[in-house]
Amino acid sequence: MVETQGSLRKSLRYQEEAARVVAGGVNSNVRLLGAPICIAQASGSQLTDIDGNTYIDYAMGMGPAILGHAHPAVLAAIRDSLALGQLYAGQHPAELELARLVQRLVPSAELVRFGVTGSEVVQAAVRVARAFTGRPKIIKFAGHYHGWFDNVLANDASPMDGAAAVEFSPQLHTLGQPASSVADLLVVPWNDIEALTRAFGLQGPEVAAVLMEPMMCNTGAILPRPGYLQAVRRLCDACGALLIFDEVITGFRLGLAGAQGLFDVKPDLSTFAKAIGAGIPLAMLAGRADVMGLIASGKVNHSGTYNSNVMSMVAGIATLRVLSENDGYVMTQIQATGRALMAGLRELGRRRKVNLYVAGVGSVFNTSFTDLEDVYDYASFKHAHEAPLKAFLEALLRRGVRPTSRGTWFVSAAHTQEDIKATLAAADAALGELQTISGA
């Protein structure tokens, strides 16, 4: 790994040209915040841009590339499927094989439905929960992200978010989002069972479901407090509401049974995406047979032209086979690699005497700069300082290390000990830059 990267001349020229024909020069607003690099190729843990610079990648497609980029088993499965056709508008054996694989790994997956994106399967979960309970209200948590659709896009990290948490009051995320879209949404702080109890006390008979990330991955990689998820489960049962785990990020990343397996809590419904397809678009709604039965009967609509397309199904099968072989050895390896990186970053922060905060688990963690000793919800995460994080990430990128633009790191099966060593060397130099800038 060289000390600094070379020119970004071609990437910058690409960005200028793209902005003339693509809105903002990007095809997802999240990428507006990222570095203006144009990727030419990805393999394993490495990215190469069109200027020839290489990067150790910890964005990993924003999480999906759990096996690394261009994993041979996934590529082979896709290649072998191409001659069979891509889209049948009908059933085929691969979708049954994948469903059985999922059911074997995830105990709560009594029935499943496949889709394409996390955002859409969250919508399916909300719809079927309302139908099953006959209730309209959904409780979500400040800082949790459940896709870009109007009815769940509230109180998360957005330019319009003026306060960390206003209990029960949804705050809109974007222009063009009508206030009526969140009229049936209650928002509470996470990791606070008393706050959730108050929300049920306020409108409990109207609450269809509690929707949450079981680990807060979109904001700060914050773990649930001990016993919190179990208390939420009990409260939902007592109040007749369903518990929905949004495992779009955590599913098949925190373990073979996702966060629900790691924390030993069984939700009524779960949404999965990202890692299940190892980079190929694939999402899934899974849950109790009696709830999913409303979809099975056709009483609740869930549709999609590209659902269970052949390429996605075979990619999912290949991914879960690799992750589950040898009693989940690959998952164990990913966690160990990530924990070593987390420990190294913490040690660098201590040695450099900077307030670097590293939170999460080995396979997905977050770096921020905060004076708080404990970050446990959105409000506490909002105390983090944006300027040093931005400078740190930019300094890392110049040295060939690429986390996400929000400071989240996704570790894959392709990351090696050599990658960790090079990453820590780059981080040490980047933190040294921060000391110089701040005069520490």
Image (tube, grey):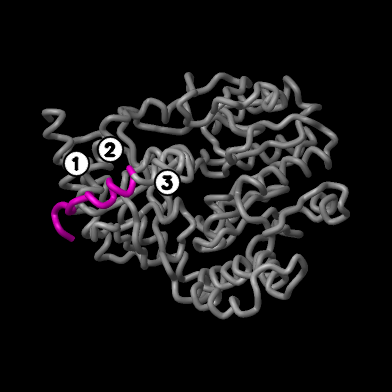
> Element under label 2?
strand
N-terminal of the pair, mark 3 or mark 1, is 3
- Identify which amino acid the numbered label 2 is placed on: Leu
N-terminal of the pair, mark 1 or mark 2, is 2
The residue shown at (48%, 45%) is: 27
Is residue 357 left or right of 258 when viewed as pictured?
A: left
What residue would you read off at disc 2? 356
What residue would you read off at disc 3? 360
Up the image or down, 393 lies above or below 190; here it is below
Q: Quadrant of the C terminus?
A: top left
* Span highlighted in magenta in the image: 1-16
Number of residues whose C-alpha sits closer than 10 Å to that of mark 2, classed few (under 14), some (14–19) or many (20 or more): many
Q: Are marks 1 and 2 in contact (CB under 8 Å)?
A: yes
- Identify which amino acid the numbered label 1 is placed on: Leu
Number of residues whose C-alpha sits closer than 10 Å to that of mark 1, classed few (under 14), some (14–19) or many (20 or more): many
The residue shown at (24%, 47%) is: 396
x and y, in percent, of residue 107 in the image? 68, 60
Q: Quadrant of residue 21?
A: top left
> Element under label 1?
helix
Per the image, is 6 magenta?
yes
Q: Are marks 3 and 1 in contact (CB under 8 Å)?
A: no
- Identify which amino acid the numbered label 3 is placed on: Gly
The residue shown at (17%, 42%) is: 351
How many numbered discs? 3
Per the image, is 99 magenta?
no
What residue would you read off at disc 1? 431
Q: CA distance from mark 1 to mark 2?
A: 9 Å
